[in-house]
Amino acid sequence: MRSEIRRTRPSMLTLINRWLLTVVRYIDFEKIVETVESLCLSAAYELPADVLAALERAARRESSPGAAKILNQLIANARIAESERIPLCQDTGLAVVFAECGSQVAVTSGAGERRATLFDAINAGVVAGFAKGYLRMSVVADPLNQRRNTGSNAPAIIHQTIVPGERLKLTVMTKGGGCENKSQFRMFRPTAAGDQIIDWIVDVVASAGADACPPFVVGVGMGGNFELSCLLSKKALCRNLDQRNGDGFYAGLEAELLSQINALGIGPQGLGGDTTALVCAIETAPCHIASLPVAVNIECHSHRHKTAVI
């Protein structure tokens, strides 16, 4: 009798596995690959609705007939790209992926067996998406020496954060080289006046000029440290264009910066007008008492990014 009870009693390993099944959500590797592939394609072809709406508002408000004409051409380009499934821009971009991974998520081959990492799945999706869409491969394996093209647009730039829950949120931004090249970083003294920082940000946009394909979306990161401020400036670009900073002070600063940037008169495609930027978005983080890092990430009018939640 004791032996029969012993044989039917679950082992400790079985109990642990059962418990894990209740707290861990397994997401299949191929599901992530397929999702990233789809995001790469939709980002290349479909301008987000908030960006298109911002261009339409700007076209209606423009006092310059020439600038309004250019804005309407950009709107028409976006509609043609979506309807005919052709890229919004010939520079189909470097894939930048923000992955918010729930703490209960595990990547598996589909049968509870670990196959590869989340990063592997994301890169596989980028390779598949750019190949399927015949999108331009823009990644070189070595930055200075030989600069040979990887031929796959991988590896992607991946930023992973762990959040509570059992969902995986993926945002793919395909970032063009022309506008990225005009982005800048500066470490201010903590005693710097607000006007000094505003003037520098406006000067960064002014120096970008026509080379970065305005009208821009301007992302600003303040605080953190050297690398975090730059990351914040790129995360700011992922915000809905209608969303202001939740802090009233920084929301006011966003409005002031946008006003001064548009007063530059660079205008759409650098040919003059009221619309040098569609929005200026600021993200912040706590920083060292001796530091005040600020980064500006310039994004062109072809502001391509898509999000999916698994």
Image (cartoon, helix red, strand yellow):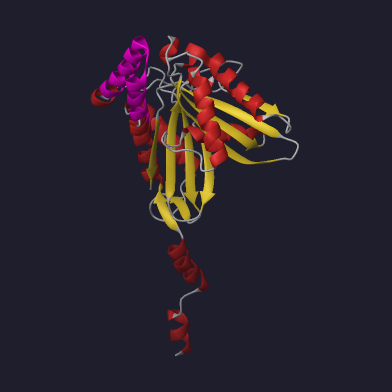
**Relative vertical location of residue 110 with respect to residue 283 in this rendering, above or below:** below
Verify whether residue 59 appears in magenta: yes
What are the residue bounds of the magenta stretch?
51-80
The spot of residue 220 in percent (x, y) is 56, 30
The spot of residue 68 in percent (x, y) is 34, 15
> Residue 259 or 310: which is nearer the viewer?
259
Q: Residue furthest right?
A: 290
* Residue plotted at (74% across, 32% down): 191
Q: Residue furthest bottom?
A: 1
Residue 157 in sight in this render: no
**Relative vertical location of residue 125 with respect to residue 115 in this rendering, above or below:** above
The spot of residue 216 in percent (x, y) is 46, 22
The spot of residue 284 in percent (x, y) is 59, 39
Q: Residue furthest front?
A: 63
* Residue plotted at (46% across, 63% down): 23
Majority SS type along the magenta span = helix
> Residue 274 or 75: which is nearer the viewer?
274
The N terminus lies in quadrant:
bottom left
Residue 285 in sight in this render: yes
